[in-house]
Amino acid sequence: MLHTFIRAVLVCFLCWGTGKAAAAEDKAMTGEKIRESAIAGSWYPGESENLKKMLQDFLEKVPEPVCPGQLTALISPHAGYVYSGQTAAYAYKFLEKQSYDTVVVIAPSHRARFAGVSVYDQGGFKTPFGVMPLDTEIISALKAKDAAIRFIPEAHASEHSLEIQLP
């Protein structure tokens, strides 16, 4: 259900590097330029039908939110759905009546320490609903504007904070 909210494009950021540096090689990073899920099947259901039902159940419990005007930012937790899914549903319920062309996800890095911003630019994120594409045109433009915006593989390897927002 949340996958349907993020249709057109997605620019994924991973910033504010904290914690210990992660090993550069990780099974979540593939050579096909698609970021395999590091947490599907453990932090949220790995099968699309089970995930869809879980998300629908969360969203059905949320009353219609009041949002005067266009939503410009949304804050959502980044823990496993059994712990934070209902809270996240209160945030994501706002998106049902909104329209947008681009979604920017900003998330912390729990394992890699670095200066600047790491933007995943390798093609897309695999979810139980399919591959979530990235807007490589916007990503390239951002990277061209500031040398501090770049792709740092270890910042994304096994990181859950951004991925948990996608399905």
Image: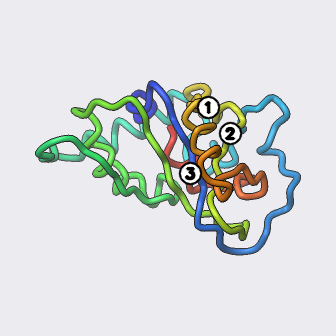
Q: Give the residue drawn at x 72%, y 32%.
A: 34
Q: Quadrant of the N terminus?
A: top left
Q: First in sequence, mark 3 or 2: give its number.
A: 2
Q: In this view, does 13 lie above or below 10?
A: below
Going by the image, does 16 lie left or right of 25?
Answer: left
Question: Which residue appears farthest toward the right when viewing the image?
Answer: 25
Q: Is residue 151 above or below residue 133?
A: below
Q: First in sequence, mark 2 or 1: give its number.
A: 2
Label placed on residue 126:
none
Estimate the x, y position of residue 160 in percent, counting from the top left. Answer: 62, 54
Q: Which residue is tagged 3? A: 162
Secondary structure, mark 3, is: loop
The Cα atoms of the two marked residues, 3 and 2, are separated by 14 Å
Looking at the picture, which amino acid does disc 3 mark?
Leu
Question: Which residue appears farthest toward the bottom when viewing the image?
Answer: 19
Q: Which residue is tagged 2? A: 121
Label placed on residue 136:
1
